[in-house]
C-alpha cells in the first residue's frame, strides 16, 4: 500500500501531524479506503491537521478534550461533560462543521455539534480543517471543519484493542475496538463508554461541581465488501447515547438533565477505474434530545428531534494524472419537530463542482462552486479558488479564497413557544474569506504560517422584541482576521526520540458596528507539547495558554486568561508483535490552577487518570 | 429560570446572557434638601436592580443620586465583598431594610437599604422567587415554584424577625408583581411560561386567599390610583401561543374587589410597564411611551416618546421625570435613560449594570 497521507507517527507523543496533499496516480481500490477522499483531494490551500489514532487512544474520549490541547480550535464547554461547542478563528459554533465520514452532521435543530457527544476513540483519525469549506461540506463550514474518519482496508486480519481507565471524580471509562477482515471483506466494531460523578471541588471555595454527572455510550460499526475488481460497498454506522446532568455554576444551582440519542448510518456504493470514481451514498441521520428541567421529576420533559435522509451522487473524473473534476449532486430531506419546534420538512438540492489541476510539479490550483436550492430560503451561490506553489522542497506558499454559508437552523426558523419565536424570513449567514499560507520544511522541522481574513454578514442574532418575546434576525456583521503558526519538530538520537509541537493563534473577531471583540474569543491561544520516547517508556508534557475572553458585548466583563498543563508517562509492559500492554498515568492541571473557560464555571484542579491499553 | 437554561441550550447552544421579565414601583418622595452630614451612603436617591447574566454571573444593585446624574454601580459588592446571586429580580422594603430577590439563586439578601450592609439571607422556602412586599408586618414573596408545573406556584410568608418562611399561600400560575393597599395584598398571576389571567387577593391578617379576580391575559403590572382603585395592565397572549389576544387595562374597585371597567387594546397590541402618577397614566407599547389619564382613559393616537427601547420604565419625581431601563442587547451593560416629561427631552443617560430592570426610590 502506498498511503498518500504521510504522518510522523510518533508513538504516544501526543502530537498532531499535518496531512500532505499530493497527487499521484491512484490505483484502483487502494488498500486503505478513506471515508472522505475529497478532504485529501480538494483541500489544497487550506490547513488540514490530523489527530492520529495513537493520540486519540491516549486521550480522554470527549472530542472537546482532544481538540483543546492539540489545536487552535477554541472550545466553549459548559463545565466538563456539559454542552460544548467549538469555534475556529473566532467564528461561532454554528460556523463550525462536523463531518462524519464525509457527511456534515451538525444538528438540524440548533445548527451546531456538541463536542461532548462525540467519542473520539472510536475513530481512526480526526482531521481538523481550518478555513472555509462550505462547497465540499455544506452549511456551517465557515471557520473550519472537524472530520471524524473511519477507514476501511482489505487485508486478512483480526485485531483487538481494549482500553480501560479510571480517572479522578469517579470516572471509569472503557473502549473496545475489534477489526477483522479478508482481502474482500472488512469489518470493525467499537464500543466506547465513559461515566463520571464529575463532582470536583471548585478550588478556593467550599463548593462542589453539583449535578455534573454524565454517562456516555458510543457504538461504531463499519463494514466494507468488495463486489468486483473495481466495485465495493461500504457501510458506516454510529450510535451515541448520552445521559448527563447539567452542572450549576458558582452563582446558580442546577438540577436539570439532558439525554442525547443520535444515530448515523451511511451506505456507499463505489465504482472506480483508473479514470474515474463514482460514488452513490445514502445516509440516514437521526437526532433526538430530551431535556428534563428537574432531575427529581423526570415525568416532565421537553423533546426535539430531526430525521434526515440524504442521497448523494459523486463523480470524479481524472484527466491524466494532473487534472481532476468532481461533480456532486445532493438531495437532503429533513423532518424536524419538538415540544417547542413546529413540525416542518426541509428539502434541499445542491450541485457542486470542484476542479483541481496540478499544472506543474510545483504549482497547482483549484476552482470550486456550489449552488443549493431549498424550499425555505434562498441560498447564496458559493465559489472558491485555491492555489499552491512550491518554491523549493523546503518552502511552499498557498492561497485560497471562498464564499461560505450557514443556514438558519430549525430553532432559528421554527421555534414556537414559551417566550420565543423563530423567524421564517431568515436568510443564511454568508462569509467571504481569504487566506495565505506558508509552509517550511527543513529536515525534521515543519513550520506553517497562515494568515486569514473573514467577513461575515447577516449573522443570526436572537433579541427580545418590545413585548419581551425573543426572536432571531439577520442582524450583525463580523470581521475576523488573524494568524496561526504551527511548528513541529522531532529529534532522534539513537533510541531516544524527542518530539515537540506548538501552535500559536492570534485572533481578532469583531462586531463591525461596535468594533468590540466577540464573546468568548481569546485573542491569543497557545498549545504546546513535548514528547520523549525511549524503548518501552514514553512521556509527554502539554501546555495550553488561553488569553482573556470577553463575556459581554461591550467588553466590560471578561474571564481571565490562564495557562494549564498536563503530564503523562506510558510504559509498555508487553511489547510483542501480536500482543501489547501499555500502562499510562496522567496528571492533568498539574499546577492545580483555578481557571474558568466559561465565566463562573470553574474547571477541575489537579486530577489523575490511570489507563491500560491491551492490543491483541 | 430553568426554561431560560433550556432555551439557552436549545436555541443558542451554550452561551448567552438572558433576561426574565420585570417591573415594580415605589411611591416615595425624595427629600429636596437633605443634610449631607447626616446622610448615609445610599440615602436620598434611587436603587436600580440589574438582573445580570443568566447562570454565569450575578446581578447587582446600583445607586443613583437624587438628581439622576451619577450612578454608583454594584454597591452590595463594594460594601460586602460578595455578590447578590444570579438574576437579581427585584427589591422589597420594610422599614430600613431592603430585601433583594435573586431569582435563579433562590435567595433573598436582607440589607440595610441606606448602607447596603448585609443583615441576613433567606435561602430556604423559596423556589424561583420574584417579588417581595411587606404587608401587615410580614414579608410576602411571590414564587413560581417549578416553572413547568402550573399548580405549585405560591406566595411565601416570611417572619421578618427571624427571616424564615413560615407559610405558603397557593396562587395561580406565574405570580409576579404584588401590591398592598393597607387591607389586601394583590398578586398578579402572569402565567410564567404560559398564559394566565388572574389577580389573587390575599388577606394578610389571615394569610388566606379571599378572592380571585379575572383580568386580561398576562397581567404584567399593577398600580393604585389616588382613589384607591387597582389598575391591572395585561399584555395579552402573544402571537406565538397560537391564540393571540389583545392587551387590556382593568380598573378594579378595591373595596368590593370587583372589576369596574376593562379597556381593550388592538389585537396585536401588547402593552407593558404601567405607571400612574397623580391622575396621569403611562404605558409602553411597541417602542413608544403613551400617556393618558386615570380619569378619562383612552388610548392616545401618538406616543409621548417613540423609538425607545425600554426593558422597564418608571415615572418619578411627581410625574416630572421618566426613567427608562435600556437593556441594550442583553449581553452588555445597560443604561438608564432619563427623560424630562415636561418637554419629553432626554436629559441624561447613565451607565448601569447588565439588564437594568427595576428602579426604587430610596428616600
Image (cartoon, rainbow, N blue to C red):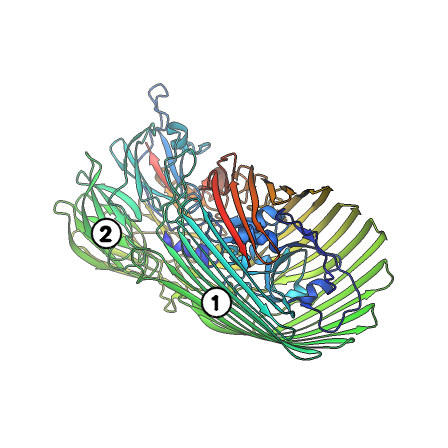
Dot 1: element? helix
Query: In the image, A20: left or right of A295?
Result: right
Q: Quadrant of residue A443?
A: top right
Is residue B275 placed above or below A411 in the rendered structure? Answer: above
Seen from the viewer's position, the closer of residues A95 and B359 is: A95
Which residue in the protein does label 1 denote? A414
On the image, the x and y values in percent for residue A76 come to 53, 49
Query: In the image, B293: left or right of A383?
Result: left
Which residue in the protein does label 2 denote? B154
Per the model, the C-alpha gap separating discs 1 and 2 is 33 Å
On the image, the x and y values in percent for residue B337 come to 47, 42
* Callout 2: chain: B
Q: Quadrant of residue B61?
A: top left
User: Do pointers 1 and 2 mark residues of a single chain?
Assistant: no
Crowding at mark 1 (Cα within 10 Å: few <14, some 14-19, many 20+): many
Q: How many marks?
A: 2
Amino acid at each position: 500500500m502506498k498511503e498518500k497521507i504521510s504522518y510522523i507517527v510518533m508513538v504516544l507523543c501526543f502530537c498532531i501531524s499535518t496531512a500532505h496533499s499530493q497527487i499521484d496516480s491512484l490505483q484502483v481500490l487502494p488498500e486503505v479506503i478513506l471515508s472522505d477522499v475529497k478532504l485529501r483531494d480538494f483541500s489544497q490551500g487550506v490547513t488540514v491537521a490530523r489527530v492520529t489514532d495513537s493520540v486519540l487512544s491516549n486521550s480522554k474520549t470527549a472530542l472537546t478534550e482532544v481538540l483543546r490541547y492539540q489545536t487552535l480550535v477554541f472550545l466553549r464547554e459548559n463545565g466538563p461533560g456539559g454542552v460544548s461547542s467549538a469555534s475556529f478563528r473566532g467564528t461561532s459554533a454554528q460556523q463550525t462543521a462536523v463531518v462524519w465520514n464525509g457527511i456534515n452532521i451538525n444538528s438540524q435543530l440548533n445548527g451546531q455539534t456538541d463536542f461532548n457527544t462525540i467519542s473520539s476513540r472510536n475513530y481512526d483519525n480526526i482531521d481538523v480543517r481550518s478555513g472555509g469549506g462550505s462547497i465540499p461540506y455544506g452549511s456551517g463550514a465557515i471557520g473550519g471543519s472537524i472530520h471524524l474518519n473511519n477507514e476501511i482496508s482489505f487485508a486478512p486480519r483480526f485485531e483487538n484493542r481494549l482500553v480501560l481507565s479510571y480517572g479522578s471524580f469517579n470516572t471509569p471509562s472503557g473502549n473496545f475496538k475489534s477489526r477483522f477482515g479478508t482481502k474482500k471483506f472488512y469489518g470493525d466494531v467499537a464500543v466506547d463508554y465513559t461515566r463520571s460523578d464529575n463532582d470536583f471541588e471548585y478550588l478556593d471555595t467550599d463548593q462542589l461541581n453539583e449535578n455534573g454527572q454524565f454517562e456516555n455510550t458510543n457504538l461504531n460499526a463499519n463494514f466494507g465488501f468488495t463486489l468486483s475488481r473495481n466495485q465495493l460497498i461500504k457501510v458506516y454506522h454510529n450510535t451515541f447515547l448520552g445521559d448527563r446532568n447539567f452542572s450549576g455554576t458558582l452563582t446558580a444551582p442546577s438540577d436539570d438533565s439532558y439525554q442525547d440519542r443520535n444515530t448515523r448510518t451511511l451506505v456507499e456504493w463505489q465504482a472506480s477505474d483508473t479514470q474515474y470514481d463514482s460514488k452513490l451514498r445514502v445516509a440516514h441521520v437521526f437526532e433526538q434530545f430530551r431535556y428534563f428541567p428537574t432531575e427529581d421529576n423526570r415525568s416532565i420533559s421537553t423533546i426535539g428531534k430531526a430525521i434526515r435522509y440524504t442521497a448523494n451522487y459523486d463523480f470524479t473524473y481524472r484527466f491524466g494524472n494532473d487534472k481532476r473534476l468532481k461533480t456532486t449532486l445532493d438531495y437532503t430531506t429533513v423532518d424536524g419537530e419538538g415540544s417547542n419546534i413546529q413540525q416542518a420538512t426541509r428539502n434541499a438540492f445542491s450541485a457542486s463542482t470542484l476542479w483541481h489541476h496540478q499544472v506543474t510539479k510545483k504549482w497547482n490550483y483549484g476552482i470550486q462552486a456550489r449552488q443549493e436550492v431549498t424550499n425555505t430560503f434562498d441560498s447564496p451561490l458559493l465559489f472558491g479558488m485555491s492555489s499552491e506553489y512550491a518554491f523549493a522542497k523546503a518552502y511552499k506558499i498557498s492561497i485560497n479564497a471562498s464564499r461560505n454559508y450557514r443556514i438558519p437552523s430549525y430553532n432559528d426558523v421554527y421555534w414556537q413557544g414559551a417566550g420565543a419565536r423563530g423567524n421564517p424570513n431568515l436568510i443564511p449567514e454568508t462569509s467571504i474569506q481569504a487566506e495565505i499560507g506558508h509552509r517550511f520544511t527543513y529536515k525534521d522541522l515543519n513550520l506553517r504560517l497562515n494568515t486569514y481574513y473573514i467577513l461575515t454578514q447577516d449573522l443570526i442574532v436572537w433579541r427580545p422584541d418590545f413585548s419581551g418575546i425573543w426572536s432571531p434576525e439577520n442582524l450583525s456583521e463580523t470581521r475576523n482576521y488573524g494568524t496561526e503558526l504551527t511548528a513541529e519538530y522531532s529529534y532522534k538520537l539513537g533510541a531516544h526520540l524527542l518530539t515537540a509541537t506548538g501552535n500559536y493563534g492570534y485572533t481578532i473577531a469583531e462586531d463591525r458596528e461596535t468594533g468590540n471583540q466577540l464573546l468568548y474569543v481569546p485573542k491569543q491561544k497557545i498549545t504546546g507539547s513535548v514528547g520523549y520516547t525511549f524503548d518501552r517508556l514514553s512521556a509527554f508534557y502539554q501546555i495550553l495558554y488561553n488569553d482573556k475572553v470577553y463575556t459581554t458585548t461591550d467588553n466590560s466583563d471578561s474571564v481571565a486568561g490562564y495557562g494549564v498543563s498536563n503530564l503523562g508517562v506510558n510504559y509498555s509492559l508487553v511489547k510483542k508483535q501480536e500482543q501489547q500492554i501499555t500502562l499510562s498515568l496522567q496528571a492533568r492541571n498539574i499546577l492545580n490552577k483555578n481557571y474558568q473557560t466559561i465565566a463562573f464555571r470553574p474547571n477541575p484542579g489537579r486530577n489523575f487518570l490511570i489507563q491500560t491499553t491491551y492490543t491483541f | 429560570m430553568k426554561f431560560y437554561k433550556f432555551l439557552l441550550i436549545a436555541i443558542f447552544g451554550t452561551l448567552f446572557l438572558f433576561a426574565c421579565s420585570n417591573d415594580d414601583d415605589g411611591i416615595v418622595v425624595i427629600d429636596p434638601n437633605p443634610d449631607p452630614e447626616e446622610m448615609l451612603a445610599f440615602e436620598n436617591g434611587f436603587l436600580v436592580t440589574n438582573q445580570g447574566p443568566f447562570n454565569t454571573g450575578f446581578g447587582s444593585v446600583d445607586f443613583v443620586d437624587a438628581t439622576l446624574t451619577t450612578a454608583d454601580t454594584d454597591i452590595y459588592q463594594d460594601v460586602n465583598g460578595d455578590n447578590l446571586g444570579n438574576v437579581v429580580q427585584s427589591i422589597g422594603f420594610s422599614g430600613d431594610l431592603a430585601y433583594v430577590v435573586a431569582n435563579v439563586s433562590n435567595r433573598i439578601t436582607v440589607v440595610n437599604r441606606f448602607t447596603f450592609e448585609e443583615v441576613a439571607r433567606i435561602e430556604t422556602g423559596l423556589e424561583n422567587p420574584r417579588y417581595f412586599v411587606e404587608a401587615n408586618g410580614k414579608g410576602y414573596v411571590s414564587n413560581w415554584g417549578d416553572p413547568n408545573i402550573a399548580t405549585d406556584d405560591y406566595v411565601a410568608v416570611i417572619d421578618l424577625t427571624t427571616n424564615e418562611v413560615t407559610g405558603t399561600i397557593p396562587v395561580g400560575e406565574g405570580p409576579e408583581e404584588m401590591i398592598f393597599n393597607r387591607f389586601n395584598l394583590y398578586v398578579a398571576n402572569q402565567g410564567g411560561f404560559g398564559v394566565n389571567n388572574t389577580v389573587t387577593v390575599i388577606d394578610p391578617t389571615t394569610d388566606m386567599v379571599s378572592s380571585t379576580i379575572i383580568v386580561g391575559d398576562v397581567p404584567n403590572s399593577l398600580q393604585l390610583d389616588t382613589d384607591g382603585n387597582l389598575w391591572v395592565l395585561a399584555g395579552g397572549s402573544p402571537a406565538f401561543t397560537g391564540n393571540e389576544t389583545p392587551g387590556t387595562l382593568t380598573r378594579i374597585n378595591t373595596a368590593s374587589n370587583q372589576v369596574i371597567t376593562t379597556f381593550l387594546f388592538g389585537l396585536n397590541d401588547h402593552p407593558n410597564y404601567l405607571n400612574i402618577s397623580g391622575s396621569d397614566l403611562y404605558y409602553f407599547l411597541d417602542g413608544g411611551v403613551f400617556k393618558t389619564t386615570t380619569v378619562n382613559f383612552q388610548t392616545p393616537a401618538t406616543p409621548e416618546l417613540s423609538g425607545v427601547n425600554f426593558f422597564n420604565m418608571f415615572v418619578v419625581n411627581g410625574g416630572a421625570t421618566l426613567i427608562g431601563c435600556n437593556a441594550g442587547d442583553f449581553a452588555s451593560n445597560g443604561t438608564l435613560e432619563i427623560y424630562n416629561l415636561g418637554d419629553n427631552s432626554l436629559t441624561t443617560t447613565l451607565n448601569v449594570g447588565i439588564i437594568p430592570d427595576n428602579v426604587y426610590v430610596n428616600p
